[in-house]
Amino acid sequence: MSGTQRVEVGGATPYAIDIGPGLLGDGERLVAPVRGRHVLLLSDSHVAPLYAARVVAALRTARPGLHVATHVMPAGEAHKTLASFGCVIDALAALGATRDATVYALGGGVVGDLAGFAAACWMRGIDCVQVPTTLLAMVDSSVGGKTAVDIPQGKNLVGAFHPPRAVFADTAALRTLPPRELRAGLAEVIKYGAIRDPLFFDWLEDRREALLAGDDDALAEAIARSCGHKAGIVERDPLEKGERALLNLGHTFGHAIEAEQGYAGGDAATGALNHGEAVAVGMVLAARLSAQLGMAPEADTGRLRALLDAFGLPTALPAGLAPEALLARMRLDKKNVAGRLRLVLWRGLGQAVVVPDVDESQVLELLAS
């Protein structure tokens, strides 16, 4: 495999995304963003046993005298809560973290969101370095600075915009990723083709087998292209006032599914969808609604569903979810304005649009069909 790729994110708070194998042990690169002498490494019970010691050793070797503490939280979306946030704040206090301290987020999207939110709040804002270990986090949550926790009423309703100081995506970490989690990340990769890049969508159709097999070169290319799209959008719209909302294709439906299932997608025994799976279903629902409203051709919906199916992702609502309950969850979505349902739909492949004031009866009909 070739060396590390870099994607630059510009704007008021620029940073770089480094993508490639071996970054978790590259102390000189990892420690470069640290401005002070305190580091809190946040990880979870799945990832910490695999990689935490390696990252801590790399940081300490590269900069002797660095004060590094590790906080390990339980794994899973169900633990992305205000209570877990409080535990991270307690860990920062125990470390004696000063205003030039850095929080490292080693793990998936849950860890990244929680670490970023804690960093945004400690002493009104300290640095956060994202070290994503899942494909989903590499192409989505680690980039752009959206941080949050969930509450029972909905997903990501309490949070802050807090761009990272750097992102390190070690593609070698994907070799230990369960197949289900790899597929979940590929849902977010497919999203970038769906919202703005039909040629990337074509590439994903052609490279499906290599991506599912965990081919290093294919995954690195998919990550770099996805991050490149997101970086450009974030640079132009850092606070999601316009174009950035397009990144949420399928997410309003998907978040409603996750919330209604109690954020239990990390537990295989429940049968609940994880985030990427819920987004896959949500994208199909958004495409179907677009066709139902006369905005987009049915054929493009079929092509999206076929690609998601080919990657082993769900494309239909799970059984047992009440349409009225899902719609109630959707009303709490952050994109809504003045109580009106505002959804990301499309005019066909690569042509996502934000549609204000969507008729709720049409959505209910879709959810019930």
Image: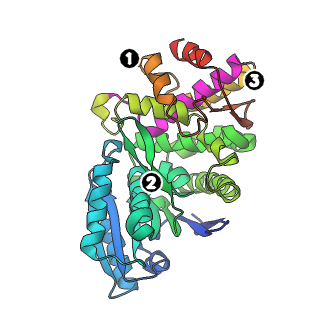
Q: Amino acid at mark 1?
A: Gly
> Does the stretch in magenta take in 269?
no
Q: Quadrant of residue 151?
A: top left
Residue 281 in picture, x, y percent from top left: 52, 28
Q: Are marks 2 and 3 in contact (CB under 8 Å)?
A: no
User: Mark 2 = which residue?
Assistant: 174
Q: Amino acid at mark 2?
A: Leu
Q: Is residue 86 left or right of residue 305?
A: left
What range of the chain is rendered magenta?
A: 271-293
Q: CA distance from mark 3 to mark 1?
A: 29 Å
Q: Quadrant of residue 111?
A: bottom left
Q: CA distance from mark 2 to mark 3?
A: 38 Å
User: Mark 3 = which residue?
Assistant: 295
Residue 49 visible, this orientation: no
Q: Is residue 235 left or right of residue 172?
A: right
Residue 320 in picture, x, y percent from top left: 38, 17
Nearest to N terminus: mark 3 or mark 1: 3
User: Mark 1 = which residue?
Assistant: 320
